[in-house]
């Protein structure tokens, strides 16, 4: 369909795309844009996306063609596309794979391209020159094999990402299979989209497969995807995740759904350091170092004593769970182990430190993605209602807020607004029959509300044994209300949770918002909807950061109903908020 004034998109020559929210084709346009553009702003009526080189390279790597991208833009645009957009989309998409890394018959690493002028240009680039040893012919260079990862990073920075076809070592063989019935005696089968994601990652086992990122919502079974990749590889595997609780959940899942015996699985955490053919480690232990006063950028890899785990065994596959949280030292060691197959798992490729390009070059490009709303429609994740409850700052705190100059302190004052506590009490009363998580950033605020609600509190200081006991009690229904700090952002499996109330967060972190909503997206046996409330202080930085936090979820199809706290507090707590308007 050609462009039409009835369509929802305005595509602009500066690579921004405006999307009209109230248009009947909004959902189609949103889902199309999510494949190749990044959402930057999402006010009420017009959302702003940007088409970037990296978003186009990820699209190209996952099989989206320039014709498909331009067809979506043309078919949903109000106006004819600016002339430069078609040229730029085709140019940037064509850059992925124009350079290739291969091995020659003797095992040397070769950078090659049919584009001879491009190779000449790159050979004169001061960032690229340190990786080049000598020209083999007009279309190929011998490069330093031990710097394979660093070369890929430099090529991305130069604007020409290489397709890595240099292959991988097989690693130590290990037979693994799924059970037909889990250890808990439940029938088990890999879902279709999970199979598709592994097939996209593996790509037939050839050099085009074996490194990349699978993006799936929290609650959609990313752990199963990781195990399916292990079964495809049939090799010893290192799994790296965020925190000891997540490590224990991985081990439990491996024992429940595969035929691996406990003797084959090792845990490498702060609690124990046991290396086995399948080893589950944490980012925290791997990045531990005793040099408290040194900056990470000033430290050598040898100063991180546990990073040797990456090279101490014959791993055939390394799985990076929550890859969007990958810390800098793990990036650096990953640059040196490019011959190992690498799978990244995440709910969002958004990184607040801007290092999405390093994920692309060192772990691999996005190989599979599916809109959250698609899985919701299929019943694989719970439908969710999102609310932003706006609370006024009391007069005394308002004056204090106005007088504070330091931004972090201003944000803290807005985030810990004591007026939020009455809203919290009302929300908990409304959901007295539900399983509720109260999540926040500031420990003094969480201490206070835990006492207010007479609820257990879990923070980073809570011993792992106590955390897991409380999580188990929550799953069993013995503890229906938990107050948790940001430790609740990451990989805790609480399938019964159906309400999350966010009191404060890490500034404008989009990834954190996605993780927190993800805590309540496990599908419910009765088909009921999940509820996500974000309580923010109006007319402060808290409200501004909330708008940024919501960007990724807006891109996935979630819309926040904005409600004034006075409306909530006048509402009968025995009734649902459905039907309320801003």
Image: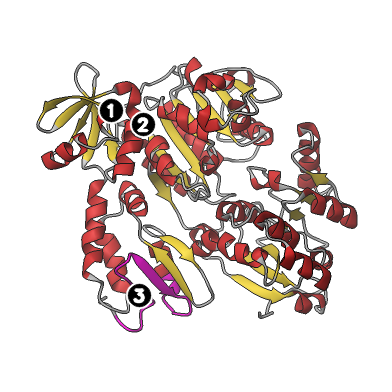
Tell me if I can see residue 409 in this picture.
yes
Q: CA distance from mark 1 to mark 3?
A: 43 Å
Q: What colouring does the structure picture have? A: secondary structure
Q: Is residue 320 above or below residue 382?
A: above
Residue interval drawn in magenta: 4-28
Whichever of callouts 3 and 2 sits on the residue coming sooner in the sequence is 3
Q: Are marks 1 and 2 in contact (CB under 8 Å)?
A: yes
- On the image, the x and y values in percent for residue 396 come to 83, 69
Whichever of callouts 1 and 3 sits on the residue coming sooner in the sequence is 3
The residue depicted at 85 percent of the width and 47 percent of the height is 456
Residue 292 figure quarter: top right
Query: Which numbered disc covers residue 67?
Result: none
The answer to whether residue 83 is left or right of residue 493 is: left
Which secondary structure, mark 3? strand
Query: Which numbered disc covers residue 150?
Result: 2
Q: Nearer the viewer, mark 1 or mark 3?
A: 1
The answer to whether residue 260 is left or right of residue 446 is: left
């Amino acid at each position: 369909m050609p462009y039409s004034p009835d369509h929802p998109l305005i595509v602009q020559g500066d690579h921004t795309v405006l999307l009209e929210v109230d248009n009947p084709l909004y959902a189609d346009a949103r889902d199309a844009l999510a494949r190749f553009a990044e959402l930057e702003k999402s006010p009420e009526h017009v959302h702003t996306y940007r088409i970037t080189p990296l978003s186009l390279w990820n699209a190209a790597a996952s099989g989206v063609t320039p014709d498909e991208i331009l067809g979506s833009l043309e078919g949903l645009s109000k106006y004819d596309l600016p002339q430069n957009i078609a040229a730029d989309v085709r140019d940037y998409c064509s850059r992925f794979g124009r350079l290739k890394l291969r091995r020659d018959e003797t095992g040397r690493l070769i950078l090659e391209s049919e584009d001879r002028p491009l190779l000449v240009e790159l050979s004169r680039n001061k960032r690229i020159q340190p990786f080049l040893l000598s020209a083999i012919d007009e279309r190929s260079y011998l490069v330093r094999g031990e710097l394979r990862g660093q070369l890929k990073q430099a090529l991305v920075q130069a604007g020409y990402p290489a397709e890595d076809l240099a292959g991988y070592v097989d690693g130590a063989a290990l037979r693994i299979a799924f059970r037909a019935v889990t250890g808990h005696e439940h029938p088990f089968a890999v879902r279709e989209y999970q199979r598709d994601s592994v097939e996209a990652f593996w790509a037939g086992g050839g050099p085009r497969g074996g490194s990349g990122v699978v993006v799936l919502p929290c609650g959609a079974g990313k752990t199963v995807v990781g195990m399916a990749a292990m079964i495809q590889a049939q090799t010893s595997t290192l799994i790296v995740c965020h925190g000891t609780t997540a490590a224990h959940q991985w081990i439990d899942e491996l024992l429940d759904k595969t035929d691996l015996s406990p003797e084959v699985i090792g845990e490498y955490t702060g609690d124990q350091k046991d290396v086995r053919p399948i080893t589950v480690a944490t980012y925290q232990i791997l990045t531990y170092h005793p040099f408290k006063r040194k900056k990470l950028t000033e430290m050598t890899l040898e100063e991180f004593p546990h990073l040797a785990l990456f090279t101490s065994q014959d791993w055939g596959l390394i799985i990076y769970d929550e890859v969007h949280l990958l810390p800098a030292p793990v990036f650096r060691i990953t640059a040196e182990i490019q011959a190992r197959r690498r799978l990244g798992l995440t709910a969002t490729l958004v990184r607040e430190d801007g290092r999405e390009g390093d994920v692309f070059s060192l772990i691999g490009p996005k190989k599979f993605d599916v809109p959250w709303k698609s899985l919701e429609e299929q019943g694989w994740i719970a439908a969710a209602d999102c609310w932003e409850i706006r609370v006024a700052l009391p007069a005394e705190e308002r004056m204090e807020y106005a007088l504070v100059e330091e931004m972090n302190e201003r944000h803290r004052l807005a985030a810990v607004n004591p007026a939020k506590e009455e809203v919290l009490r009302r929300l908990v009363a409304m959901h007295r029959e539900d399983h509720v998580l109260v999540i926040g950033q500031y420990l003094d605020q969480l201490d206070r509300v835990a006492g207010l609600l007479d609820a257990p509190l879990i923070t980073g200081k809570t011993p792992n044994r106590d955390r897991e006991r409380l999580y188990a009690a929550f799953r069993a229904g013995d503890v229906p209300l938990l107050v948790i700090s940001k430790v609740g952002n990451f990989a805790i499996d609480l399938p019964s949770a159906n309400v999350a109330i966010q009191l404060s967060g890490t500034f404008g972190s989009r990834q954190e918002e996605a993780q927190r909503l993800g805590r309540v997206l496990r599908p419910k046996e009765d088909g009921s909807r999940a509820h996500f409330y974000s309580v923010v202080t109006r007319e402060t930085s808290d409200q501004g950061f909330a708008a940024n936090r919501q960007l990724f979820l807006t891109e996935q199809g979630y819309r926040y109903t904005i409600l004034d706290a006075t409306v909530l507090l006048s509402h009968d707590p025995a009734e649902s908020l459905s039907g309320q308007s801003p």
